[in-house]
Image (tube, grey):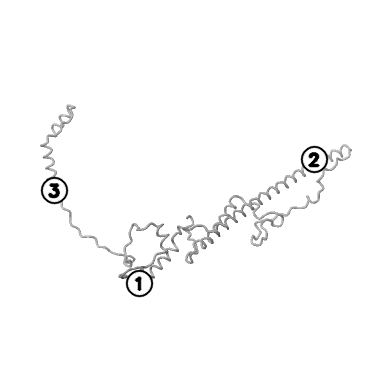
Amino acid sequence: MTKRKKEAEVKGEPVPDPPEEEMEDDDDEEEDIEEPEPVEQEPPTVELSDEEKKRWWSKQAVSDLTMYVVNTTFQKYSLPVKEEGFDELRYPWQKEDKVKEYLKAWVQDRKLTSRVEDLQPGEWFLARQKEWQKALAAWHAKQSSWKASESKKQLEANQREQKRKVYEAQVLEAQKEGKEPPAKPEGLDDQSLKEPVVKIDVELIDVFSIEDIFDLGNGEPLFANFQFEDWSMLSLRFELHLLSHAFRKDANDADRVLVPLDHLPF
């Protein structure tokens, strides 16, 4: 077969199919090849760690229940009792009181580490959040009003200063020419406008001693110079404060009074 194949390749002809007899011989040769028998090996010795020896059962790689189902039902877990219709209850691994202690400890640990999947914001949370949004809007409006007032005062002061310079130049020009000085424009002699503006350094103020955050004493609100980052940090601080207190109310569980740090994204 190999010889005919080479001759066909030299002549450029298609390789002929081998006769059926040769194919059967090849199959027989393959069948005659004996596979080596596997070498018998001793099974590995299983060694358990101290932690594994304390277990009463093996942990499975795949849980029987999804984490969501466990988190929403584990508080209802309980041991069977004869009143439920059982003929006999046996505890072959540990005594009943030990089993009860284990279940109680397991449930308590789950409460401290698991998410409250079905937690919904209550009326207290929604009411406080609404009040916060209203107060925040009022503070933004007060800041805008203060800035507009300060800009107006600054503009009026610049205009008065410009008029003063023009008037003084006219007076000097009239004196040089021996003429009567022009009439002084209104407002240049207003003493109330000459009173110094009280400047307050907010960095030196104890914010907890302020009675009115809308007026530090000169009409300036405490948050007059807040930027976007300041408002964001203020909102975040309040939202975390509200969340920590609302969680205790909405969870309605004496064993769940704090939010685990890992659960904040949830």
Camera-side mark, 1 or 3: 1
* Identity of the residue drawn at 80% across and 40% down: 166
Q: Residue 96 shows which numbered tag?
A: 1
Compared across the picture, whether 80 is left or right of 28 comes to: right
Label 3, secondary structure: give it. loop
Q: Residue 166 shows which numbered tag?
A: 2
Res 80 quadrant in image: bottom left
| Residue nearest the observer in this picture, 204 or 176 | 204
Q: Are marks 1 and 2 in contact (CB under 8 Å)?
A: no
Real-space CA distance between mark 3 and mark 2, rounded to the nearest whole angstrom: 118 Å
| Residue nearest the observer in this picture, 13 or 138 | 138
Q: Are marks 3 and 2 in contact (CB under 8 Å)?
A: no
Res 26 quadrant in image: top left
Real-space CA distance between mark 1 and mark 2, rounded to the nearest whole angstrom: 101 Å
Camera-side mark, 3 or 2: 3
Res 104 quadrant in image: bottom left
Instruction: Name the residue beneath numbered marker 3.
Output: 34
Q: Residue 232 shows which numbered tag?
A: none
Label 2, secondary structure: give it. helix
| Residue 82 place in picture, x, y as percent | 34, 70
